[in-house]
């Protein structure tokens, strides 16, 4: 059975153009010659639009755009792929197509060109990343509102009445701090990712609060941010572990940086967890394969993506519905490293 993708490929146009023309053959948003060509090819291939989907999304394109402000290859990032899997699962159920907008921006916010592109989509899902500062996120929200683009946002909340799905960063920090204190640690280090990320302050605040509840002080010299640079992680860890009164535990807020901590501990002839406990965050696929296996916080990434797509689709079908801020719970997974 031919699909809208087959029609778009044969016509040499985007699926957005095909969707627009088949829903409105006279649409001025596509040139007359191209409209005729799309209709001719659709008839030749025998393509018939999904009428249920068309009824649900009358006057729409049937397309949801997703923007990830990130200079790295997004499919190498396990967080992004889990978000994406959740998003795609719900959109397929609701007969929407998903387009991913990529760009070479070094900033963590949506660009003007992406907003222009977004006119071909019914709505957008924005995934804030480690590049996204509070100012970037607020600017993105302002631009989307000004362009009247319905959207849902994932990861890092900066206030405002928007559809948002994420996790409780302060609770994550608290859970890890409490766990380490309950296991007898008193000299504990906090190794964060990006200091400018909106996720960092609440996670650190929760961590401090948990330590304070156990009458443990988090020393300023044991608080550092690596900006997700491998060499920075090694340098910071090496500096801490060479101290006479070194920390006995490190909370690293990204599993992806934990192998660097393991490597430095090995250099210093320290055994994990006997000499140094390590807790991560993410529960990425290699966490259970490390030696020793990693104690970490499992994040509901797939469900966050799915719920964000659900919020956006509901918003498209009920434009006057109230926006929602949803925080999903995480789970500390105890393994061998702490």
Image (cartoon, rainbow, N blue to C red):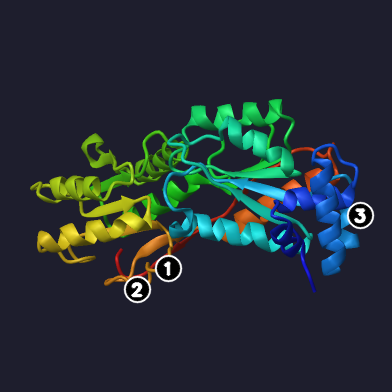
Across and down, in percent, residue 48 comes to: 87, 65
| Neighbour tally class for label 1: few under 14, some 14-19, many 20 plus, Cα within 10 Å | few
Tell me the quadrant of the picture where the C terminus can be found: bottom left
Q: Which mark is residue 28?
A: none
Quick check: 222 above or below 44?
Answer: above
At 88% from the left edge and 50% from the top edge, which residue is drawn? 23
Asked which quadrant contains residue 157, the reply is top right
CA gap, disc 3 and disc 1: 40 Å
Q: Is residue 175 above or below residue 133?
A: below
According to the picture, the residue beneath numbered tag 1 turns out to be: 285
Of helix, strand and loop, which one carries label 1? Answer: loop
- Answer few, some or many: residues within 10 Å of disc 2's Cα (few below 14, many 20 plus, some between 14 and 19): few
> Where is mark 2, residue-wise?
289
Q: Nearer the viewer, residue 128 or 157?
A: 128
Q: x and y percent of residue 66 in the render?
A: 62, 47
Q: Is residue 47 visible?
A: no
Which residue does the numbered mark 3 point to in the structure image? 55
Q: CA distance from mark 1 to mark 2?
A: 8 Å
**Nearest to viewer (mark 2 / mark 3):** 3
Write the residue at 37% across / 50% down: 253
123 relative to 251, above or below = above
| Residue 197 percent location from the top left of the image | 43, 37
């Amino acid at each position: 059975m031919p699909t809208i993708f087959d029609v778009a490929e044969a016509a040499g146009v985007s699926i957005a153009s095909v969707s627009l023309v088949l829903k409105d053959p006279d649409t001025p948003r596509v040139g007359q010659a191209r409209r005729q060509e799309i209709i001719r090819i659709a008839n030749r291939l025998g393509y018939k639009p999904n009428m249920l989907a068309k009824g649900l999304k009358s006057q729409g394109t049937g397309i949801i755009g997703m923007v990830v402000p990130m200079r790295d290859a997004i499919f190498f990032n396990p967080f992004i792929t889990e978000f994406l899997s959740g998003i795609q699962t719900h959109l397929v159920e609701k007969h929407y197509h998903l387009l991913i907008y990529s760009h070479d921006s070094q900033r963590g916010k949506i660009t003007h060109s992406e907003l222009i592109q977004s006119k071909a989509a019914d709505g957008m899902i924005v995934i804030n990343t480690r590049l996204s500062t509070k100012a970037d996120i607020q600017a993105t929200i302002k631009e989307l509102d000004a362009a009247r683009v319905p959207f849902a946002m994932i990861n890092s909340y900066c206030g405002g009445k928007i559809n948002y799905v994420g996790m409780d960063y302060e609770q994550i920090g608290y859970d890890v701090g409490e766990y380490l204190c309950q296991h007898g640690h008193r000299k504990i280090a906090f190794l964060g990712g990006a200091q400018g990320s909106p996720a960092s302050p609440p996670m650190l605040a929760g961590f401090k609060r948990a330590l304070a509840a156990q009458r443990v002080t988090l020393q300023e010299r044991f608080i550092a941010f690596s900006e997700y640079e491998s060499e920075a992680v090694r340098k910071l860890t090496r500096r801490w572990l060479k101290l006479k009164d070194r920390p006995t535990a490190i909370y690293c807020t990204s599993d992806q940086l934990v192998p660097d901590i393991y490597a430095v501990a090995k250099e210093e002839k320290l055994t994990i967890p006997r000499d140094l406990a390590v807790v991560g965050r993410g529960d990425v696929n290699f966490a259970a394969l490390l030696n020793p296996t990693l104690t970490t916080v499992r994040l509901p990434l797939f469900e966050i993506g799915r719920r964000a797509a659900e919020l956006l689709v509901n918003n498209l079908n009920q434009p006057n519905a109230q926006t929602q801020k949803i925080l999903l719970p995480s789970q500390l997974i105890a393994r061998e490293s702490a």
